Image (cartoon, coloured by chain):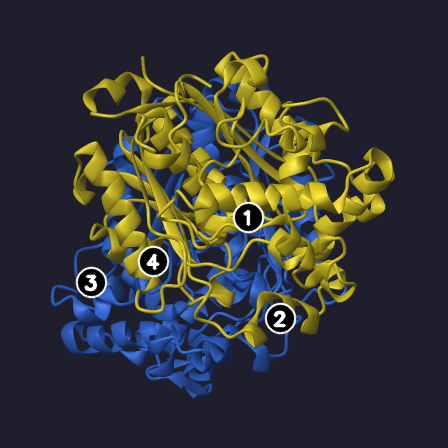
Chain colours: A blue, B yellow
Amino acid sequence: MTGRVAIAGAGCTPFGEHFDRSYTDLAAEACHEALAEAGLSPKHVEAAWLGTAFPDVGVYRGRSGMDLAESLGHAGIPITRVSNYCATGGDALRNAANALLAGEVNVALAVGVEKQRDRAPQESIVKLMVETGHPFYQKGFTAAGTFAVFAARRMKEHGLTREDLAAVSVKNHAHAARNAKAHHRKPVTAEQVLASPMVAWPLTLLDCCPTTDGAAAVVLVRQEDARRFPTPVLVAGIGFSVSSGWDQPFHDERFDFIGFPAVRQAAQKAYAQAGMDDPMKDVQLVEVHDCFSINELIAYEDLGLCKAGECARLVRDGVTRLGGRLPVNAGGGLLSCGHPVGATGLRMVYEVARQLQGAAGDRQIAGARQGITQNIGGPGAVGFVSVLRAPL
Amino acid sequence: MTGRVAIAGAGCTPFGEHFDRSYTDLAAEACHEALAEAGLSPKHVEAAWLGTAFPDVGVYRGRSGMDLAESLGHAGIPITRVSNYCATGGDALRNAANALLAGEVNVALAVGVEKQRDRAPQESIVKLMVETGHPFYQKGFTAAGTFAVFAARRMKEHGLTREDLAAVSVKNHAHAARNAKAHHRKPVTAEQVLASPMVAWPLTLLDCCPTTDGAAAVVLVRQEDARRFPTPVLVAGIGFSVSSGWDQPFHDERFDFIGFPAVRQAAQKAYAQAGMDDPMKDVQLVEVHDCFSINELIAYEDLGLCKAGECARLVRDGVTRLGGRLPVNAGGGLLSCGHPVGATGLRMVYEVARQLQGAAGDRQIAGARQGITQNIGGPGAVGFVSVLRAPL
């Protein structure tokens, strides 16, 4: 890369059920919080990237960048829609960063929006895909089914237990009690997680993130312009990688059902850009993609927070809880915030930015100077990692 | 922008009905033609942008960049899916160009793929949107219905006739007879166009492009690297703009149903980048987005090929036919090639590149040194324009 970008402002709606507010309303709220922080108005935005993963299972908004124009109250600029399954938000940020570094524009906006609660479950993406012939869904490889295989594999290989999985959910729900924007803010016990309905063995309902509405946005500028803004946060490194399609995990004999090569590739690139060797030494907080409890544990290893096979130790020893040596998902993660698909990658960036600004309220991590976000998509085949740094 | 990019290779499948070949097959064919021209193999691609507009009304491929990995036979790189209605292909190219100019990568691939013929008409996007509550579709604003309003308006304001519309279809079908990759290669007469079934007055079936399968791809590099490749074509200018959402044309009292502000904005930007004042003087061929015959005529004005209200004269006088002063849609346009949505914007770039290389066979335009592509999306609210130039 020929430079770096910085976050001039970040915004995030409360995540939850928003039957009283439209897709357009949610996008507008996130954009306007981000612009207000930067001291900008919509007309200052020179190009935008809109991340929505599933318009067809939501409210039929977000197929095109043009669906952002009304929310923003500004048109006559390029607006690209990106979509990369659950890593959509991270990829929106990456493409916005490229436009800045290419000199296409001086102020770029990345927005993620998903409105998923308006549709009845019988119209869900899973039903649609099963009925219309997506072979992996027909064979039970729904999202929960896909990641459950990784949990089972780690139980056999590394002695992972259902209690370890439950401990992730307990930790993140406890964190969310301090986050007014989380969908589920009520703490849960390990007993409740283990006793909740089985979704795809060994994952129970409380090992799974909920279905949620929400939006998040960041205003980006080039690093050299960042000092003009009141509260900038440096994007020290970005990594993005795609390892395969849906099929490869099931056809490629090297695929081990232990971790995600795309995340490892993305982390390597982001860390190199950030000039960072060891995240356990160099960062004070991490937001990972815990769509299911198992995914948080896998992320510990893919991000290099521990050695291979040792992820459970971090949660058993309390390393990754608020107050521990390296808090993970201090905002409650996907398990408690929910997962409005296109918004999630940018909600993580918002959370880390607020921590680095010392503006995270009840859940503030003392001395947070550098943080990581990790966003995955598809069967883990799409990986995004960012390293964010407090300005000097 | 801090530089320009060049096309190192371009590829395009035949457009048509491909019941015997998958989405993955079509993408692979377009990519491999483009890579072969550049003398590269898939492993040289450092990042890719996949343009597919409607996975849900097609074959459920193309929701994510990961659906390109198998076609390409290469992974471990960033692959973004972009989607911007019918301007998806142009936007894929633009984001790939940004990544090159940002220094993220040195070789980028932009691919557009759409497989639309496998689904029965009763599962069409229009039916889906009507049933699930998209308000404009419920009121008759299908694609044909939307653009028919522009034709009616121009009949009243400028004396446009149904014969003028038919003349566009006759011209483009005549051109397609010379293009082995076009979906419909049989010439039609004005009488046939006028007598074909009425779709949305005044547009008949032969004023409308067909539903088609196909893929197109371009390999891009920075201008300074272009001379290493055998047949490079310079991307002298790129413009992309979004004017509004679906709603604005119907709510904004300034909207005149005459032309598309997004295209005018995109053209202005692309021309300025290319250092070009007057396309009638400076270019030898143009590919425009004739999804309906009326759209080609509107494009003449939005691109500055004639004065306001005078578009019909260009087709009446034969200016835009092969052999005329400025041939438009020498490859047959969307009306004859068909419109695999994500692929169209890149098929146009492929066509212009082949002309600038002197490799357009029977339809070669003598002395072609500079050309324009124009790709629109949604109700004309998304506009992409490129200026391509033969290398010195």
Find numbered disc 4 in the image and state the secondary structure of the residue it sits on: helix
Sooner in the amino-acid sequence: mark 2 or mark 4: 4
Q: Position of residue B48 (x, y in %)?
A: 33, 43
Q: Badges 1 and 3: C-beta atoms under 8 Å apart?
A: no
In the picture, the disc for residue A310 is 3
What is the spatial separation of the Cα atoms under label 3 and label 4, in whole angstroms?
Answer: 32 Å
What is the spatial separation of the Cα atoms under label 3 and label 2, in whole angstroms?
Answer: 48 Å
What is the spatial separation of the Cα atoms under label 2 and label 1, in whole angstroms?
Answer: 18 Å
Find numbered disc 1 in the image and state the secondary structure of the residue it sits on: loop
Sooner in the amino-acid sequence: mark 4 or mark 1: 4
Residue on which disc 4 sits = B67
Between circles 4 and 1, the one closer to the viewer is 1
Look at label 2 and name its amino acid.
Answer: Leu
What is the spatial separation of the Cα atoms under label 4 and label 1, in whole angstroms?
Answer: 19 Å
Between circles 1 and 3, the one closer to the viewer is 1
Location of the C terminus of chain B by quadrant is top left
Q: Which residue is at the front of the view, B318 or B15?
A: B318
Find numbered disc 3 in the image and state the secondary structure of the residue it sits on: loop
Q: Is residue A220 left or right of residue B214?
A: right
Query: Which chain is mark 2 on?
Result: B
Residue on which disc 1 sits = B86
Residue on which disc 2 sits = B128
